[in-house]
Image (cartoon, rainbow, N blue to C red):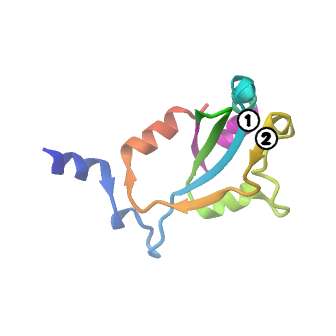
Amino acid sequence: MLAGARSLLHTRHDALSRDGRNELIAHVWRGRTAAEDAETYGGVLERTRARALASAPGSLGVLVLWRAEGDGAEFVVLSLWESQHAVEVQRGDDGSGLDVHPDEDVYLIDREQEASDYEFYVRGDLALAAALWTRP
């Protein structure tokens, strides 16, 4: 039963495009707020960058994760894209297309200056369904 479930949820090399590269990209960014600003920041993040990323051409959806950590809160924005090309188009020539929205900076006490892009090695239907569920 477990092996059958694994084969249903995961593909490995058959998820690669014809040229041998994976087409799905996860764009991951992290930031930190003070604990007392976490709820407010989460709302700002949802109304600004998360909504913009989810509705961008080539976007497959956005997940916003957070956790309380000591005297602050860490946020992770994970957006899924149909290709690296789609990420680059959204990023734009000046590199600012995926940047933190100015309204967010008021609450951030620490943040990554640049997000990281990852290709999918194992791609599961569950992860894709979760991302698509959050799409507006």
Pick the residue in front: 47 or 90: 47
Residue 77, horizontal then vertical, whole percent: 63, 43
Outermost residue, front side: 70
Q: CA distance from mark 2 to mark 1?
A: 5 Å
User: Is disc 2 in contact with disc 1, using a CB cutoff of under 8 Å?
Assistant: yes
Q: What residue is at 74 percent from the left and 29 percent from the top?
A: 41
> Which residue corresponds to mark 2?
109
Q: What residue is at 59 percent from the left and 35 percent from the top?
A: 66
> Which residue corresponds to mark 1?
33
Q: Is residue 117 magenta?
A: no
- Amino acid carrying label 2: it is Ile
* Neighbourhood count class around disc 2 (C-alpha, 10 Å): few under 14, some 14–19, many 20 upward: few
Q: Quadrant of the N terminus?
A: top left
Pick the residue in front: 112 or 98: 112
Query: Where does the magenta region start and end?
Result: 48-65
Residue 42: image tag: none
Per the image, label 2 sits on a secondary structure element best described as: strand
Q: Position of 15 compared to 97: left or right? A: left
- Amino acid carrying label 1: it is Thr
